[in-house]
Image (tube, rainbow, N blue to C red):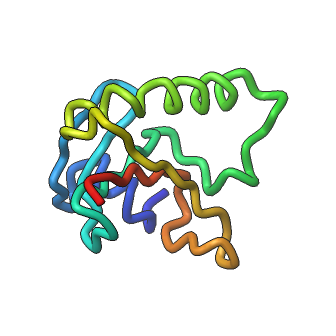
């Protein structure tokens, strides 16, 4: 998506404080943190939001599973060994500001 901020970060055309990256996912610091540690886990595959996930698409199901399983190791790397919170804002009414699926990982309260 050419107008998607997260796609631009993934492409490297917009800077971000990246803390983790692999072939499928990128994690960077939120520019307006709500906690001492506030990271965003973003799939490189552009999916608008949780409510646009296709439950019959194996790639979408695998993506969600992989992201959930990746969160604890990212939290530990960020110094959140004693606990963390994850959220997904879905749609305008749910507080989603960027139309690209992502998990918020927060901790250090």
x and y, in percent, of residue 58 in the image = 72, 21
Q: Residue at x 15, y 54 (%)?
A: 17
- Near-viewer residue (29 or 37): 37
104 left or right, relative to 27: right
On-image quarter of the C terminus: bottom left
Q: Position of residue 65 (x, y in %)?
A: 60, 25
Farthest right residue in view: 56
Left or right, residue 86 beside residue 10: right
Asked if residue 15 lies left or right of residue 64, the reply is left
Quarter of the view holding residue 49: bottom right
The residue most toward the bottom is 93
**Residue 74 on image: x %, y %:** 30, 33
User: In which quarter of the view is residue 62 placed?
Assistant: top right
Residue at 19%, 38% (x, y): give it. Answer: 79
Residue 19: x percent and y percent?
Answer: 19, 41
Q: Quadrant of residue 60?
A: top right
């Amino acid at each position: 998506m050419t107008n998607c901020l997260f796609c631009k970060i993934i492409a490297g055309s917009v800077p971000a404080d990246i803390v983790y990256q692999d072939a499928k996912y990128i994690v960077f610091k939120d520019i307006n943190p709500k906690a001492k540690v506030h990271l965003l886990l973003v799939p490189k595959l552009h999916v608008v939001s949780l409510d646009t996930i296709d439950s019959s698409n194996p790639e979408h199901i695998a993506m969600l599973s992989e992201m959930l399983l990746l969160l604890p190791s990212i939290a530990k790397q960020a110094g959140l060994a004693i606990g963390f919170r994850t959220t997904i804002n879905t749609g305008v009414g749910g507080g989603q500001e960027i139309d690209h699926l992502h998990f918020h990982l927060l901790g250090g309260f």
